[in-house]
Structures are given as C-alpha cells and as structure tokens.
Amino acid sequence: MQRLNPSASTGSQPGSGKPAGSGRSGNPARRNAPRTRAAATGRPATAGDWVSGARLRTLPLAIAPVALGTGAAIVAAGPGSYHWVRALLALVVALCLQIGVNYANDYSDGIRGTDANRIGPARLTGGGAARPRAVLSVALAFFALAALAGLTLVVLTGQWWLLLVGAAAIVAAWFYTGGRRPYGYFGLGEVFVFVFFGLVATLGTTFVQVGTVNTESWLSGVGIGLIACAVLMVNNLRDLEPDRASGKRTLAVLIGGTASRVVSCVFLLVPFLIAGFFGLFYPLAWFTFFVLFLAVPAGLIAVTATTSKELVLALKLTSLTALAYGVLLALAFAL
C-alpha cells in the first residue's frame, strides 16, 4: 500500500521540504490562527458558501439512524402503532446536530488554522469566506433548533431524563473540535460518532416512538455507527498530512496511513455481518447486500489511493453507503 502524496494535501514552503509554518517551535495551528482571523474579514459569504459549509454530503449520517430506529419501532409496536410525528422530530434533532457540528468544526478548526491547506469543500472560516463569529452564530442556531425539537420530544414522551441525553449530545458536538482541549484532536472522534450518530440516534428514535428498545435497534445502531466511523476515518485519512502538520492528532494520525486504511475497511464491512444476521429473521434484509456495490469500491479506493484528492470519491461513496444501508435495513424491519 502506498503513502499519501504530501504535496497533494499540504502547504509546503517552496524548496524547504517542510510543511508551512514548521520553521519555528510551538504549535503551527496556533501560529496560523491570527492570519486566519485576518483573512476572514474579506468579502461576505455567498449562499453557496454557507450551503457548502453545511456539508450536505454528511447528512446521510443523520438520516440513516433515524430510519433504522423507526424501522425497529415498527417491529416493537406494529405497523400502525409507531408515532410518525416523533420520528420526524427525531430526524430534525439529528439533522440539526449534524449541520451544527459541521459549522462548529468549521469555526473551531478555522480559528486554530488547521483548515488552511485541506483538500475538499471550501471552509468558511479557514478560507476567509465568512467571519468566525458569523459561523459560530450559525452553529449555535442549529444546536438551538436541535434542542427545541428535542425538548418537544421530551414533552410528548414525558421522559424528562432525555434532557440529559440531548444536553450530552450538544456538549459532545461542540467539544469535538471546540474548547481548549477538543477530544477530536486526541483520536477520540470515532468514539463520538459511534455513540451519538450510531447508538444514541438509533436507540433514541426507537425509544421516543414506542417507549422501549429492542435487538433491532441495538444491532442496527452498532452497524450504522461503524459506517459513520468509516466516513470519519476516510475523511481524516484524506486530511492526514495537514492534520499531522497542524498538530491535530486524529485516530488516522495516531495509527498511521496504512492502519487507517485497514480500519476504515473493517468499519465499512462489519455492518454487513449484522445485516446477514438480520437476514435470518427478515428476508428483505438480504437486499442490504446490494449496498456492497457502494461499500466495496469505497474500501478499495481507501486502500489504494495515493493522493488526498482520490479519497474524496471514497468519502462520497462511504456516505452513500450509510444512507442506503440505513434505508434498506429499515425497510426490511418495517415490511
């Protein structure tokens, strides 16, 4: 397996062979921060900039667990007994959290200077398209919308302890890259993604509809959580060199490029073992294996890519894998 080509993803000083900003001691990200803030005083961001900043391609990670949780709720209560309004509210919570964390990451990474040389969608803060305070305000607005939808679910269900779950989700979303010691900078991003966009989103969706959880919600939550981890791993593999240069120690940085490629494939393919288990009880679950037409190419690209730009396609395919896996397995439960 070949290493990523650093020249495709880092800002090197001409003739130096060193990453930009590496000539002095200290954290390069911190040194770049003032320059990033200054750049953010340019032209106002366009509507297209803000849409790009929302990173719509990540929204399948919010839709899939809600679909699975709803399918599991139908299994638990029967086709006519689940609450579709609560399912929609759960979807609003998940979507707003996903968009909120995307803007929060844009803000936090941007003011640290770690987004300066990334491959992929343009960053609002790091690219100077929007003022940092504006990006932060939009992130907080989406967190507030998620909180409002979540509070509505709490009132409808009467389960006030869910407030703690919602608060934990928002706090975890912020401190992924925010705060003085963001845990996403210390290799724990996959833990957050697995817990909140896997287990919590799936189990929570089932619980608010029928007041219980079942094997379907637990195992499908594990499956979609692992695919979400694969998305994050491929994303961080794409940004491996810029993250390493800026001091952002993602799991990909900690374990290295070769191990990251293997782990991303494991994250991507293990959920199909879960789908095979469900196929023993829900015949339509076997249709989930058609999603391998997305997952296998995504894994092959992740393993063989030699530049960061090649991994952009793997990232798109992995995100589509999450959506297709969630929807097809949910339909297998519901039908």
Image (cartoon, rainbow, N blue to C red):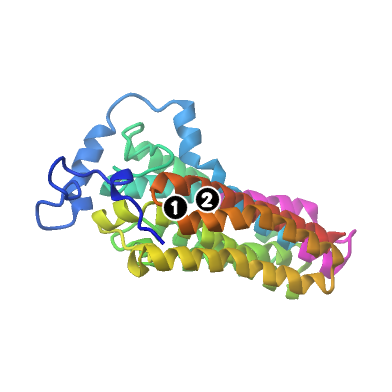
Name the front one of labels 2 and 1: 1
User: Along the line of sight, which residue is nearer the eye, 149 or 39?
Assistant: 39
Q: Quadrant of residue 282?
A: bottom right
Could you tell whether 22 is left or right of 286 in the image? left
Tell me the SS state at disc 1: loop
Give the magenta range: 71-97
Displayed quadrant of residue 44: top left
**x%, y% of residue 210?**
78, 66
Image: 96 above or below 303: above
Helix, strand or loop at label 2? It is helix
Q: Confirm or deny contact between disc 2 and disc 1 (CB under 8 A).
A: yes
Which residue does the image show at 27% across and 49% down from the upper left?
112
Crowding near the residue tagged with mark 2, few <14, some 14–19, many ≥20 C-alpha atoms within 10 Å: many
Q: Earlier in the sequence, mark 2 or mark 1?
A: 1
Residue furthest toward the front?
Answer: 1
Camera-side residue of 138 and 188: 188
**Which of the 4 image quarters holds residue 197?**
bottom right
Residue 78 can be seen, yes or no: yes
By secondary structure, the bulk of the magenta-drawn segment is best described as helix
* Residue 280 against residue 319 in the figure, above or below: below
Q: From the viewer's side, name the closer residue of 197 and 22.
A: 22
The residue identified by callout 2 is 314
What residue appears at the point 25 percent right and 33 percent down from the top-left corner?
A: 39
Q: Which mark is residue 305?
A: 1
Q: Quadrant of the N terminus?
A: bottom left
* Residue at the image position 68 percent from the left and 67 percent from the top: 272
Q: Is residue 86 magenta?
A: yes
Percent of width and height locating residue 249? 32, 63
Kind of residue at badge 2: Ala
Asked whether, in this view, residue 319 is left or right of residue 280, the answer is left
Q: Quadrant of the C terminus?
A: bottom right
Q: Residue at x 59, y 53 (%)?
A: 297
